[in-house]
Amino acid sequence: MNIETTTTLSLSHLHIGQSATIDSIDLRLDAKVRERLLVLGFVPGSLISAVRRAPFGDPTEFEVRGSRISLRKSETQFILIS
């Protein structure tokens, strides 16, 4: 299931099984973390899917560019999707 909206949301709003396109990474995110996310494939235009969430709701596993990466909600709030 894809999010079909023109509204920009943070990645933390993506539900398990949903996909979206990465719009940008907020510049307020720590520069080292932001750079690492870009290296891992979190680049604008990439399709990202929420795969599963830990039992207590954090972190969430995402699939992007063929890799699966788990991120905490504190990081996903800075990744903007549409």
Image: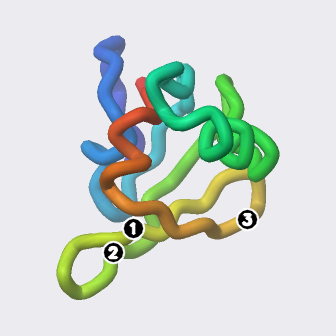
Q: CA distance from mark 3 to mark 2?
A: 16 Å
| Label drawn at residue 53 | 2
Look at mark 3 in the image and give the residue it sits on.
67
Mark 2 → mark 1, Cα distance in angstroms = 4 Å
Residue contact between numbered discs 2 and 1, judged by CB atoms under 8 Å: yes
Using the image, tell me which numbered label, if any, was put on residue 60. Answer: 1
Which is more toward the observer, 82 or 2? 82
- Residue at 55% from the left image edge and 22% from the top image edge: 24
- Residue 78 % position (x, y): 41, 34
Please tell me in which quadrant of the rendered image residue 69 appears. bottom right
Q: Amino acid at mark 2?
A: Arg
Measured in 3D between alpha carbons, the distance from the residue under mark 1 to the one under mark 3, in whole angstroms, is 14 Å
Point out the residue furthest to the right here.
39
Where residue 53 sits: x, y (%)? 33, 74
Say few, some or many: other residues with alpha carbon within 10 Å of mark 2 (under 14 / 14 to 19 / 20 or more): some
* Residue 12 x %, y %: 31, 47
Residue 6 is tagged as none
Q: How many marks?
A: 3
